[in-house]
Amino acid sequence: MKIAFASNDGVYVSQHFGHARKFVIVELDDITHARRCLETRENDSPCTLGEHDEEKFERSVMLVADCKALFCAKAGNYAHVRLSRVGVQVIERHGFIEELLEDYVRYLKRPLFGGRKRREVIDDHPCFSEKAHNTNGRLHLPVSPACNIRCRFCRRTRNTDEVRPGVAAGLLRPEEAVETVRRALKLCPMIKVVGIAGPGDTLATDHALQTFRFVHAAYPDLIKCLSTNGLNLPGKAKELWDVGVRTVTVTVNAVDHDVLRNIVSWVKDGRDLIAAQLQGIRECADTGMAVKVNTVLIPGINDTHVADIARAVSMAGAARQNIIPLIPQNEFSHLPAPTCRQIEEARQEAGRYIEQFRHCKHCRADACGIPGVSDLAGALYQGRELETFSHG
């Protein structure tokens, strides 16, 4: 892999990306991390007095487009976006190149879960672990605008008072995520997890992946969590891992196509949702991520099918299942919500195949705080006008 350092003297990183006169390029062996200085690439600085020349800016981006990471003292939001689109991770640090390189190699050599075992990461996650549920906080960043399937029970909307999935006060842009995390940690220092759970599907667009790149670079020790319907999950495991995602939740409401047709009215391009979900779970589990499956219990539709779901997702590699009651709305507004007894019976049946999580709070896509203890989303976004979002 190649690493770029924005510098003016070839020794010290002290310049913004747009002001650097040269980029020092170092090659690291992917396995041994042995290094060698390849070259110094001269740069015609595109930024002057807060303005930038678009053609020069594009040339600067292409100068480092073959690198995995770029060290610079600072980069603006526009630079972050352009560099992320060509696969370059921006690391805002200043210092001697040799010392920054040593730090980066130590980072690459870290244990896969940031120095903690996989079990410890799960134990710190309030949406995976019972013991963390009332002590550790989580932040959901509402960056995903659209969906690629249409569930008959789903109603996505913009408001500040409903407590359920698919709801947010509005959309954040990926470029706003790091600042939002910073403010959230100030409000709730117990936050351990930064998750993306909508309000659309997180993999229907690239907004979630962009957001995780920014957040993981700024807060590598926070757990990154993605929730998805799984349609676009196959082939994404490595990319998710590379942007810091270590826990994934996939909503699986059927593993039989006849049952699924009663739940999902439309799938983009007519693709096989069930096959995609099971393949995606398998790939994420094989990569090393902890996978949880959410299943909406729908009386008269899939209530006798939940054990089949549990068996199938367990065989694919999921670690636990979260059975959540239907909220009667949209096309299913006429159906009753399942009773506590029905939910418990479903958990008992499914529990023969996979560990059950029993503390779900039906969190919003912009939730902030400790589940069941504090709701800080209002304070986090107070006075801010968020963008509206597509209903997919």
Image: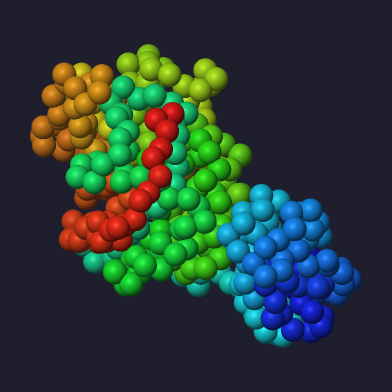
Q: Could you tell me residue 72's position as x and y percent? A: 68, 73
| In this rendering, position of residue 391 left or right of residue 382 | right
- Between 47 and 252, which is closer to the camera in this rendering? 47
Q: Could you tell me residue 152's position as x and y percent? A: 31, 22
Residue drawn at x 35%, y 25% is 151
Q: Could you tell me residue 243's position as x and y percent? A: 56, 56
In which image quadrant can residue 5 be found?
Answer: bottom right
In which image quadrant can residue 2 be found?
Answer: bottom right
Task: Determine whether 267 is above or below 228 in the image.
Answer: above
Residue drawn at x 56%, y 51% is 210
Which quarter of the figure is the N terminus placed in? bottom right
Residue drawn at x 54%, y 60% is 214
Residue drawn at x 70%, y 77% is 15
Q: How is the image coloured?
A: rainbow
Task: Determine whether 64 is above or below 274 in the image.
Answer: below
In which image quadrant can residue 182 be found?
Answer: bottom left
Q: Could you tell me residue 17's position as x and y percent? A: 70, 68
| In this rendering, position of residue 287 left or right of residue 321 | right
Residue 95 in view (yes/no): yes
| In this rendering, position of residue 333 left or right of residue 244 | left
Q: How many marks?
A: 0
Task: Determine whether 95 is above or below 227 in the image.
Answer: below
Which quarter of the figure is the C terminus placed in? top left
Residue 313 in view (yes/no): no
